[in-house]
Amino acid sequence: MTTESGNATAYFRAKLQFEIDVMDVADRLPSGEFVLIDTRRRASWDHGHIPGAVHLPTAEIESRATVLIPAGTPVVVYSWGPGCNGSTFAALAFAALGYPVREMIGGVEYWARNGLPLKTISGEAPGRSDPLVTAHKS
């Protein structure tokens, strides 16, 4: 193995320890093995969030995380989607506080595009799959 391919292997192995995709989150959320954190602003949360998520905007993590989530509890963070790095900043904030943290790749955008339900201020909205994104049947 060349140094370049060894570096790539190490990089991708490490990356997978800190990321999780939306379907894995959907499958594992009911188990309670982690707390799912929506890191977006209130207006975005109200517009639609993942049922069972806790709303904790990135800017408030440092001051509120230890009050809301016991130390050492695994967390998964998400923000809007692939065009937004808000969840990366949130993951960094949780890591700096010592939490085991993973970032949900795709964010709430790909949660919805996979046909999974969202909760809004009006109630729960059923998901509709985007056939270009998933083979998941809703």
Image (cartoon, rainbow, N blue to C red):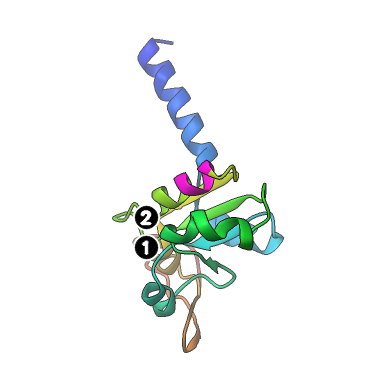
Residue 25 in the figure: left or right of residue 72 = left
User: What label sits on residue 86 in the rendered view?
Assistant: 2
Q: Position of residue 109 (x, y in %)?
A: 38, 65
Residue appearing at x 50%, y 38% in the figure: 16
Whole-number angstrom distance, CA of label 2 to CA of label 1: 8 Å
Q: Label 1: state its secondary structure.
A: loop
Residue furthest toward the left?
A: 83
Say if mark 2 contacts mark 1, CB within 8 Å.
yes
Q: Quadrant of the N terminus?
A: top left
Name which residue type carries label 2.
Answer: Gly
Residue appearing at x 57%, y 62% in the figure: 26
- Residue nearest the viewer, comparing 7 with 53: 53
Q: Position of residue 104 (x, y in %)?
A: 48, 53
Residue appearing at x 49%, y 80% in the figure: 126
* Badge nearest the viewer, 2 or 1: 2
Q: Position of residue 70 (x, y in %)?
A: 68, 55
- Decide: few, some or many residues near mark 2? Use Cα within 10 Å; few <14, some 14-19, many ≥20: many
User: What label sits on residue 64 in the rendered view?
Assistant: none
Q: Which residue is mark 1?
A: 80
Name which residue type carries label 1.
Answer: Trp
Residue 3 in the figure: left or right of residue 97 = left
Q: Label 2: state its secondary structure.
A: helix
Name above or below for residue 118 compared with residue 81. Answer: below
Q: Is residue 82 magenta?
A: no
Residue appearing at x 41%, y 74% in the figure: 42
